[in-house]
Amino acid sequence: MTQLLEGTQLPDTSNREIYTIGWIRAISTENVAARAFLDETHDMKGFVPLSKHDNNDYTLGRMGNHNVAIAVLPEGEYGLSSAAVVARDMLHSFPNIRIGLMVGVGGGAPSSKHDIRLGDVVVSSPRDGHGGVFQYDFGKTIQDQEFRTTGFLNQPPVVLRAAVSGLKATFELEGNNFEETIGEILKENRRLRRKYSRPGPETDVLFCSQVVFDPEHLANTEDQSSLVQRPERTEEDDIPAIHYGLIASANQLMKDAVVRDKLAAEKEVLCFEMEAAGLMNHFPCLVIRGICDYSDSHKHKDAAMPAAAYAKALVCRIQQARLDKEKTIAEVISLIENVNYNLLEIKARTRDSDALNRLSVIEGAAYDAHQNQHDPTCHPDTRTEILQDIMTRAKDDKDQRIYWLNGKAGTGKSTIARTIARAFDDIHLLGASFFFKRGEGERNKASLLFSTIARQLVRKNEKILPFVVEALDGTENISSKTIEEQFRKLILDPFEEARWDSDNIPQSVLVLDALDECESRMTSRL
């Protein structure tokens, strides 16, 4: 219970680093419940101004050995995006927060497997490939509408899941004393009794899913045919009971018993709420919900108190030394983002590699191919003038883009071409090379020239890769197109697009040799 002990020295709340647990709630009743379970409330008067990015209203205090920052969604705002904004702003002002809790009320999904009652608590727990929270989308929240699932959400941090496991075992052996604890709080604060006291068991009725309730009239609970018959709980049962499993989250309030039962049967969903899915991938946390209704048309009183009671028991179970070893949530998010980025990169590279494999290429056409390892290059200090002239012109952006070297057969043109290709490769200017050769496989085919060059170019210059892939995706069997179309789509357009996309496109030199050994009908077109 909240108290300020006389003579007790409070921590230096101007130091935001002391707060290691972030607690988020959606509505004012959840806010009141959270504050009621603080062992100590910290004075905000001397608090250092919050980050300029932070619009949250906070309550700061201590639970057990841990300092907790509690934030509530703005009045009248609900849903996934609002919760995500509150979490984001909290991390701006409290960078040392290591674990998060989303604590409040939710709609229960009772089933034959899970006897969920009003006032019970549901704790998010990983199930069947889900991280504990399951995001869904209905389109319309009326009966008989179909639903579809959307995305995967991260599971809570290990330190929280370990504490949940330990607390679960303790409660199975000893039971929980939440009813007594809540009773003590209400005894000390009469103002809370009417709103936060647990209603009598006679008010806890579960209607058959086909019964649609008119909120302007009272339900006829005397009509037993409209009710689901459930046995009374005994002294051997925990009140409230704690349930562990999947929580369904969406931007819309679940008020449809038919869809509730469908998701409970198909996904074993235990509870429905409106904020958690907005947090799990940006604020790794445990979701704790007190059951205030049955996700149908029948609304009952608040159940924020038992949810807050469980949250406090969980916080007090976590050892300070164990929590200190945890990474901050900001660090975890950074790691997750890096991993996700790397996965996206791997997927993109795999996709691009698959696309490039559709390019028909000629093996052995490059100057440094294994087949050409014994072909000669110029001896040192020979042909220096012509080699220097080629190097100078290639590096000069203002000079002509094409250098045509011609001469009689056997005068060393191919030797010069190999030498210049190697020289440009050594200084990372060579984009691609293609040495035609009659009588060696397909090395005299102009139809495969530009697809072969394109494959080499993307290995040297990744900035043109997406544009080459785009050309491949947009043109079926591009190697069968005219050489003019191939040149435009595989070489010219990708470089032009890359220059629009980035100013820093490295220069690339293409070395082509022995055009006279190309297919005779194609030589003039090249």
Image (tube, grey):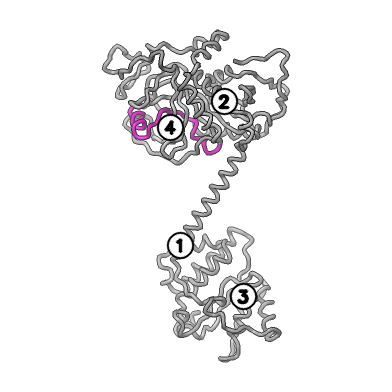
Q: Amino acid at mark 1?
A: Ala
Instruction: Give the structural element (helix, strand or loop) at label 3.
Output: loop
Q: Amino acid at mark 3?
A: Arg
Mark toward the start of the polypeptide (2 vs 3): 2
> Which label sits in the foreground, 2 or 3?
2
Residue 169, given in percent of the width and then of the height, sits at: 48, 25
* Residues in magenta, as a range: 257-282
Crowding at mark 4 (Cα within 10 Å: few <14, some 14-19, many 20+): many
Q: CA distance from mark 1 to mark 3?
A: 30 Å
Tag 3–tag 4 contact (CB < 8 Å): no
Mark toward the start of the polypeptide (4 vs 1): 4
Residue 133, given in percent of the width and then of the height, sits at: 46, 34
Q: CA distance from mark 3 to mark 4?
A: 64 Å
Mark 3 — residue? 401
Mark 1 — residue? 355
Q: CA distance from mark 2 to mark 3?
A: 73 Å
> Which label sits in the foreground, 4 or 1?
4
Q: Quadrant of residue 140?
A: top left
Which is more toward the observer, 111 or 473? 111
> Which label sits in the foreground, 1 or 2?
2
Q: CA distance from mark 4 to mark 1?
A: 40 Å
Which is more toward the observer, 240 or 411? 240
Q: Amino acid at mark 2?
A: Arg
**Residue at x-position 62% and y-position 83%:** 377
The answer to whether residue 469 is seen in the rendering is: yes
Mark 4 — residue? 246
Q: CA distance from mark 1 to mark 2?
A: 53 Å
Mark 2 — residue? 317
